[in-house]
Image (cartoon, grey):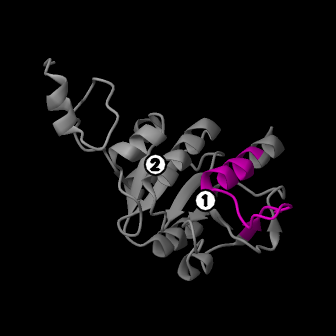
Amino acid sequence: MDFVPRASLDRMAPDLVHQGVYASLLPLPLLDLGEFLDGKDPLPSPLVAVDGVQDPRNLGALLRTCDAAGVQGVLLPKRRVAPLSPVCAKTSSGALFTIPLIRVGNLSQSLMYLRKRGYGVASLALGGSTAYRDPFPAPLVIVVGEEEKGVSRPVLQQSDWKVSLPMRGKVSSLNLSVALGIFLYAQSEDSC
């Protein structure tokens, strides 16, 4: 540990409120899907797949929600996803470091692979035909799409269910981590 002047911290972390502390860490260990599943029986808690989420704050909030709800891991595609940045880490309140992160090349192909291994795939989608309170069998992968367009067409084609939450107000959608949290907790109530 080194003590340095505040000006040095400001130069090392120019866009962050560092509160006088700065740490340099090794890269996060990202798992391969095969090694994550190897030798494991599927768990009752779901996996979450991230499809095109670009905002690191949204990704951080999603990881925080996943940790709180006991998700077994999060699938992150190599492309079209926000970076695992300091902003993401801060928004996640540390969940970025507690939940298994699984790097996948092509999300729709990874979902096809998981379906062959017995997983069901539920995508959160505006206008979906399945209610969020309906019971879903385990093992389950829940797909959350990007902020504006939602889940991509190739990923929707791998989905067994397109799940929607009722919107009773004038705003057309919820923040993705809020929608995911509602769905996760509705499912955990059914399995208790």
**Residue 146 image point, x, y percent:** 54, 67
**Residue 106 image point, x, y percent:** 41, 73
> Which residue is painted at 59% across and 43% down in the image?
65
Q: Quadrant of residue 159?
A: bottom right
User: Mark 2 highlights which residue?
Assistant: 39
In the image, residue 62 above or below residue 10: below
Residue nearest the observer in this picture, 102 or 118: 102
Question: Going by the image, does 187 lie left or right of 69?
Answer: right
Whether residue 38 is visible, yes or no, is no
Q: Quadrant of residue 67?
A: top right
User: Mark 1 highlights which residue?
Assistant: 141
> Which residue is painted at 45% across and 63% down in the image?
54
Name the amino acid, label 2: Gly
Q: Quadrant of residue 103?
A: bottom left
> Which residue is painted at 69% across and 70% down in the image?
125
SS for dot 1: strand
Residue nearest the observer in this picture, 182 or 147: 147
> Which residue is painted at 25% across and 44% down in the image?
27
In the image, residue 37 above or below residue 20: below
Give the position of the C terminus as an image quadrant: top right
Residue nearest the observer in this picture, 78 or 176: 176
Highlighted magenta segment, given as a residue range: 162-185
Q: What is the C-alpha distance between the residues marked 1 and 2?
A: 18 Å
